[in-house]
Amino acid sequence: MGRCCYSQRKLPLQALFSIEKMWLSCEHNKIMEKNGSLYDLHPLLLQVVHTVKRHKMIGPGDAVLIGASGGADSTALVHCLIDLEERLGIGRIGLAHLNHCLRGEEADRDHAFVAEMADSLGLPFYDKKVDVGKFAKKTGNCIEDAARVARYRFLGETADNNGYDKIATAHHAGDNAELVLMNLIRGAGPEGLAGIPPVRDGRIIRPLIHSSKGEILDFLHTHSIPFMEDSSNTDQTFLRNRVRNHLIPVLREQYNPGIENGLNRLSEILREEAAWLNSTVDLLVQDATIESGNELISISAPFFRSQLAAVQRRIVRAAIERVKGDTRKITFQHTDDVCRCAATGRNFSLDLPDGIRIDGSPDKLVVSRNSFPGNRNVAKDTVHFQYTLFADGFQDTTLTIKETGWQVAFRVVTPGEIPPEKFYDSRIAFLDTDRLNAPLTLRSIRPGDRFTPLGMAGSQKISDFFINAKVPSCDRKSCPVLVSDGRIVWVAGHRISEHAKLTPGTSRALEVSITAVPDDTRQ
């Protein structure tokens, strides 16, 4: 009996819970029929069987390397997989332990515990010491990120060198709920809220991902299995510990007793929908690809610009993943910057984390490693230009900045004829003509340029303004500024100066708007 027989969308939540219990009951009966032992009655074992089979984690004869820290979770995972070894068709099991050199004697104690556990269970044991503190400084990562990178690198190398098919880690449902909440706090997108995948890259498996911390501890206590306590789990300087020990208990007690279940349900929904979207986007990337290699992928810019913004961001992430191998450190801001720059149809260049470079032109977007020899042929350096306007007084006129492809239109209006919605369009500005002195200068930005943004009392460097406003570097390079008497009164497309704003006494205004010149009309 499998859950695929039911249409979950049409069933009430209570019915789904009943189906889940029926499924687990059937799994339990199968186990009891095969090896009827009291030990198999524990719910954690049933849940592990369910999880492994549901996500196809282990194939017949697979050799499984377990990442063992000595803590409750990994110790429970070791004993679960040993007890279920025959039932799950596991070929052999090994333990691997990385000493992060962060907790002194406590870390040495954990190492000795795992080594003794492996010996007592007759399992191969692999260990290594890595000074994660030094590794973090070398890589520029925080301690938590550096520890994760070092750990998975060690597990991957150990599995490769010793013929293991799968790497099992002890992430459980509580870990996933914490990560989802942490990513929600950070403002992550669907991938971040999808949490910890049960299976990653077809090799890393999480058999406890649907099991709770309570079930794990009950399993250990029921069978008198010892484990080590990690004192760093109470260190409130780590965000994860604050979420685990403070935020989730508050949410559970005051808002939703089932908060962990809710967060896990959210992550599962988003993970499944993301999988469907990504498979669709992969087909789009395939259709849009002009050139592809180990360190480069080039896609059609016109095709890219024709897609919806949400699809564009996924295309960017998919292209980066093909070049980089993953999308770690690639944030929403990075993908949004690429989309905004590509929308202009002009040349641009962006440097992203981990040596990824995006070069754009009207015809194509190139994602490559920074070291790739041909990746700098489409980007322009910062452009320089300067135009003088209104030598004979303010009047309606239009100017094309041939160096950048921007078109700037000027129109003299009265405040009463300005439609209210125009004040909300960042591409349009209104300046008090009585506070301007002709002629005006429209020029490129210069190092050290300052202005007083609308609403501020003091001046600010334009470079700092761009950083605070998260303006992509491609926009900064070609952004014009309007100058009156040596004072910048408008940073085109972004903000006017406090010194040129309209007031109740304004009788005449200069409307200024900026648009991109269509590709087919450029000289």
Image (spheres, rainbow, N blue to C red):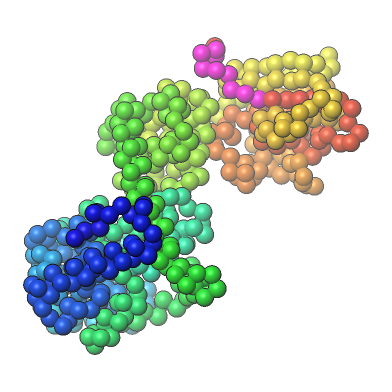
Name the outermost residue toward the right.
505
Q: Relative to the observer, which residue lies in front, 279 or 492?
A: 279
Depicted 500 relative to depicted 508: above or below: below
As drawn, 193 above or below 314: below
Q: Tell me the residue at 46%/50% (across/down).
A: 189
Residue 217: x and y in percent read 31, 80
In the displayed structure, does residue 259 sit left or right of residue 440?
Answer: left
Q: Does residue 93 lie above or below 395 as drawn?
A: below
Question: Residue 179 lies in what quarter of the image?
Answer: bottom left
Report which quarter residue 28 is drawn in: bottom left
Name which residue lies at 67% across and 21% down. 408
The residue that appears at 83% across and 34% down in the rendered structure is: 502
Tell me if residue 392 is in the magenta stretch: no
Instruction: Name the residue nearer the viewer: 341 or 13.
Output: 13
Task: Give the residue at x 10% y 78%.
Answer: 36
Q: Position of residue 492 (x, y in %)?
A: 67, 30
Magenta residues, start to end: 514-522
> For this rendering, which residue is in front, 502 or 96?
502
Question: In the picture provided, is 89 more to the left or to the right than 245?
Answer: left
Q: Is residue 80 visible?
A: yes
